[in-house]
Every structure is written in C-alpha cells, then in structure tokens.
Image (spheres, rainbow, N blue to C red):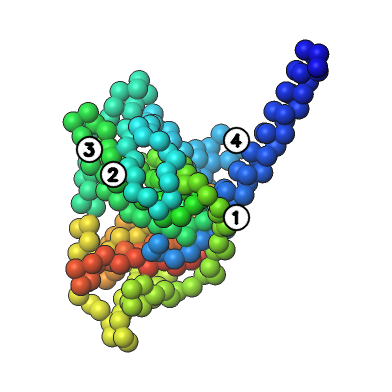
Amino acid sequence: MSAGARVASFGALLVAIFALAALAGSALDPATEAVGDGHDAATRDGDAHGGAPPAGTAAADGGLRLVAQTPTTLSPGRRGRLAFRIVDAGGATLRDFETEQARRMHLIVVRRDLRRFAHLHPVQDATGAWSVALTLPDAGVYHAFADFTTAGTRRTLGVDLFAGGRFAPLALPSPSNFAAADGYDVALRDDGDELRFTVGRGGVLIAALQPYLGARGHLVMLRAGDLAYEHAHPLGGDQLAFDVGDAAPGRYRLFLQFRHGGRVHTAALTHEVRP
C-alpha cells in the first residue's frame, strides 16, 4: 500500500473511532430525566449568553477549581479512594474552610440517572488535600459535588466519576409526596419556600428524631437533566423542614436523610418546583 493510501486509511479509522465514542458517551450519560431509590431559567442557571453554570455542575467557579488527585475511573463494586484539592486562580491549594452543618466538607456522589446516592465527609490532610473512601456500586457515569464554605461564601464544585461496565439508565419516578426507607414512611408537604417532612413507622408518627449534622435532618435536591444542585437549609424548631426558596424551577430528586435508632436513613422522592 502506498504512503498516501495508508494516511487515508488511518484517517478513516480515526473518524470511525470518534463516531463510536460519541455513541458510547450518549448511552452512558443520557440527557434525560432519569432517577431512583435513595439507598443504593434564572440567571444562576446559565444559558447560551454566558451565564454561570448551574451550581455543582462545573469544576471551576468564582475563582476556585476542583482538581482530582486520584483517577476518576473506578471499578464498580470495589472500594476505592477519591482525593482532590480546591485551588485558587493562581493554583494555590485552599486550606481554610468553615464549618457548615457540622462539617467543613460535604461530598455528594450520585449516578447521573440519580439512582445511586452517597453523602460522604472527606478528611483534609496536612497538604490541604481532601480524601475519602468511595465505592461506586454499579456501572455508569457518576457526579461528585464538593459542597463547602470559605470566606463566608458557600460554594459547590463538581467532577464526573466513571465506573466501567454495561449501564442501562432507569427512568425518573413520577412526582410523589410519599416515600419509604428502611421500614419508615416519609411524607412531604410543600409550603412554597419551605418543604416539610414527617416520618413514621407502622402507622405511628416519630417525633423524636435524633440530630444529624447539627439538625433534625439533611436535604439534597438535584434537578433532573442537568444535575443542578441545591443543598437546602434546615429550619430550626421541632419540625423536619427546609428553606428551598432559592431553588430554580424544574423536576428534582430529593434525598432526605434523618437519624433514628442510631442509624442514618435516606428517603428519595421526585418533586416539581414550579415558577
């Protein structure tokens, strides 16, 4: 084969490879409203005219950047480790973080169809890097949200994680005000800017929930389609309630965590936030 023919053949092979990669990427990371069980148009949302990306979807924001220190591809079902740094515009590692909801760093990990959820608390070492043990239970594309407060401002930066293998995304359950978790029954009441929950078991309302992260519970909201992140603020008092007045319109998966019987339980619901 002549040199020209070999070059042409190699070019055709590259085109085929990139086409297959695009197809594989669309199968692993579908832009659909897909979601599941909790165990296992505003400026802030950004647009084609240069607005900021939705919270948590980008690795860089506000002059800070999340830099992974360990591989972002893990073997499904096998215990691994994720390490990362938060660096400033000059590349220096940020070391000063403030305590928010009893921790200096919250790490939320979800599969992109929202069927897998984990809430972790990395540990910072002497160099300023954060690390945490992590298991991605099944194949798929995941997203990790580093949620922290520094200089009085709360920020969320994100990075994609990958677990190789065959992946079939699951459909997003329909909106509902009820969920079950570990034998507990959870009911939601939408009061506009506030979401209020009750927890029961065996038909009996449980009023004495144990504190979790300095409050009666913890709520993460993730919008289907783009994974826009909302870490709701718990309200004081005896009710399990959260301020969600800043949430942009869309369909969200809610991950409610509460402590009872010495264990943390997670309930997941689909909820529509209307304009």
Residue at image point 23% right, 67% down: 263
Residue at image point 30% right, 51% down: 120
Numbered tag placed on residue 132 in the rendering: 2
Q: Are marks 3 and 1 in contact (CB under 8 Å)?
A: no
Residue 157, compared with residue 198, is above or below; it is above
Tell me if I can see residue 193 in this picture.
no
Q: Position of residue 48 (x, y in %)?
A: 61, 37
Q: CA distance from mark 2 to mark 3?
A: 9 Å
First in sequence: mark 3 vs mark 1: 1
| Residue nearest the viewer, comparing 192 with 113 | 113
Q: In what element is the residue under mark 4?
A: loop
Q: CA distance from mark 4 to mark 3?
A: 37 Å
Q: In what element is the residue under mark 1?
A: loop
Q: Are marks 4 and 3 in contact (CB under 8 Å)?
A: no
Which residue position holds label 4?
Answer: 49
Q: Are marks 4 and 1 in contact (CB under 8 Å)?
A: no
Observer-side mark, 2 or 3, equals: 2
- Quarter of the view holding residue 157: top left
Residue 219, compared with residue 262, is above or below; it is above
| Residue nearest the viewer, comparing 133 with 218 | 133
Numbered tag placed on residue 90 in the rendering: none
Q: Position of residue 175 (x, y in %)?
A: 52, 69
First in sequence: mark 4 vs mark 3: 4
Residue at image point 32% right, 37% down: 83
Q: CA distance from mark 2 to mark 1?
A: 30 Å
Numbered tag placed on residue 32 in the rendering: 1
